[in-house]
Amino acid sequence: LVRTTGSPLSEWMVLTGRENPPDLSERADLRDMLNWGNASEESHRSMLQTELGQYVWPGIGCVQLVSMPYLVGTIDGWYLPALGGRTIVELKAPARWTYDEWDEEPPMPARAQAAYYAILTGQRDALVSGLLPPAVKWASFVVDASMAQQILDRLGEFWDGYVQKDIMPPAACGRFDRKLVEKLHPKDDGSIVVLPERFDALKEEWDRLSVEKKSAEDRIEDIGAMFAGEIGNATWGQGRGYAMKDAHTSRAGYTVAASEFRVLRRCNKVSETKGGV
């Protein structure tokens, strides 16, 4: 069953039996966020009702798309506007550090999830509401035929092209996908693979960002030296609305166990001892 969370690679690994679903007992951050969302759902729904002036019905359980039975979802709620059919409601309880993503409208992942649930239930109207205490922020939109077809096409391509054929999808989600790739390919075998042409642009971006990162790191060191020089023998430097601390710290010694891991580095060319390219 295709879920709407995680990266394509992480979902593929679960669906093909290469990885177990996330163990929330080992991810306190995810567990706390899910618990907060579940515990606040009733009050969230009540606040949204006040905003809408309409009763918001609780979720209607697990829904499956008959034409694509691997697509399922659990609906948070729905309501009946004055005119028109049922509107599917998606309730989100975003982490505090993501509140700025809701400044103008709900972020695209939340709207895509609501659209997905509207498709599963055969509805055209969806509403996303974010619980940003002490208020809720919501937006409704129409899931037109073009949007619905685009979502179904992408999910169908993922299922038929990667899951059913057992072909690994492209890795793209930063350090998270990098760890999954390391699980799939823990060791290199000395062979050479010719990279697709699209990686030429990625290599140029890598070079540009590496230069920018080094420049930023150097500037951070410069600024740190300025603060340290100004603070001198003191422990704190008091600014206007902020403070900087420059104090001695100690760290207990420790021993790191031997381990093996792969490191991605840039090279000018493949070594001639490897056969060249």
Image (cartoon, helix red, strand yellow):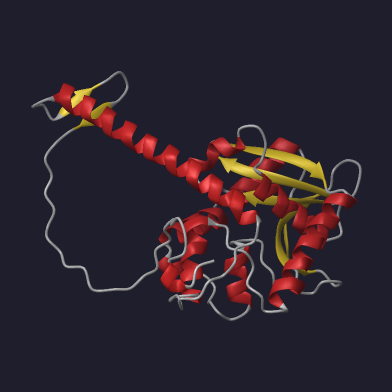
Q: Nearer the viewer, residue 181 or 156?
A: 181
Q: Position of residue 194 (x, y in %)?
A: 59, 66
Q: Position of residue 10 (x, y in %)?
A: 57, 67
Q: Position of residue 63 (x, y in %)?
A: 76, 68
From the viewer's perspective, is residue 223 above or below residue 145? above
From the viewer's perspective, is residue 3 above or below residue 227? below
Q: Is residue 135 left or right of residue 253?
A: right
From the viewer's perspective, is residue 140 above or below residue 265? above
Question: Considering the image in quadrants, where does the N terminus appear?
Answer: bottom right
Question: Considering the image in quadrants, where does the C terminus appear?
Answer: bottom right
Q: Nearer the viewer, residue 114 or 236?
A: 236
User: Looking at the image, which residue is at 69% across and 75% down?
Assistant: 163
Q: Is residue 113 left or right of residue 68?
A: left
User: Looking at the image, which residue is at 91% across and 45% down?
Assistant: 84
Residue farthest top in this picture: 240
Q: Nearer the viewer, residue 74 or 11?
A: 11
User: Looking at the image, which residue is at 16% across and 67% down?
Assistant: 255
